[in-house]
Amino acid sequence: MAGIYIHIPFCRKLCSYCDFYHLIAVADNQAFIDALLIEAAVRKEYIGNETVSTIYIGGGTPSVLSVSDIKEYLVN
Ligand code: SF4
């Protein structure tokens, strides 16, 4: 059984106390989505034949991405 964690580092504001890796959100996230897709392809073999039972999307503030951005990533 395997789980996948996807870290979305963007936030609408930067909180000084936060220890998570975070950046201020940008309007165009396409370069980030493209990089996520490349990383997923590179790491695909790592999971092998394991069944992925959970996908957790954390951050940051994952809701700064559009539904279409997240859908593009999950479908691909
Ligand atoms: S992850 Fe949450 S606590 Fe951390 S900087 Fe972003 S909004 Fe603030």
Image: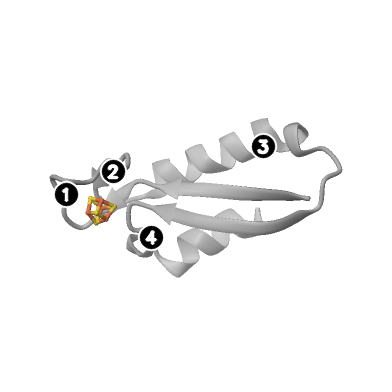
The crowd level at tag 2 (other Cα within 10 Å; few <14, some 14-19, many 20+) is some
In this rendering, the count of numbered labels is 4
For ligand 1, tell me if the residue under mark 1 lies within 8 Å: yes
For image coordinates 67% across by 37% down, the residue present is 41
* Proximity of marks 1 and 3: CB atoms separated by less than 8 Å: no
Q: Mark 1 is on which residue type?
A: Leu
Q: Name the residue under label 1.
A: 14
Q: Mark 3 is on which residue type?
A: Ala
- Residue 43: image x %, image y %? 67, 33
Q: Mark 3 points at which residue?
A: 41
For image coordinates 58% across by 36% down, the residue present is 38
Q: Name the residue under label 4.
A: 65
* Proximity of marks 2 and 1: CB atoms separated by less than 8 Å: yes
Q: In 3D space, how far apart are the residues under numbered discs 1 and 3 (Cα atoms)?
A: 30 Å
Mark 2 or mark 4, earlier in chain: 2
Q: In this view, does 60 lie to the left or right of 45?
A: left
Q: Mark 2 is on which residue type?
A: His
Query: Which mark is in front, 1 or 3?
Result: 1
Q: Mark 2 points at which residue?
A: 22
Mark 2 or mark 1, earlier in chain: 1
Q: Is residue 36 above or below residue 25?
A: above
Q: In 3D space, how far apart are the residues under numbered discs 2 and 1 (Cα atoms)?
A: 7 Å
Q: In 3D space, how far apart are the residues under numbered discs 1 and 4 (Cα atoms)?
A: 16 Å
Q: In this view, does 48 lie to the left or right of 53?
A: right
Q: Is mark 1 on a helix, strand or loop?
A: loop
Q: What element carries label 2?
A: loop
Mark 1 or mark 4, earlier in chain: 1
For image coordinates 81% across by 52% down, the residue present is 51
Pick the front one: 69 or 5: 5
For ligand 1, tell me if the residue under mark 2 lies within 8 Å: yes
Mark 2 or mark 3, earlier in chain: 2
Which quadrant of the structure image shows residue 56? bottom right
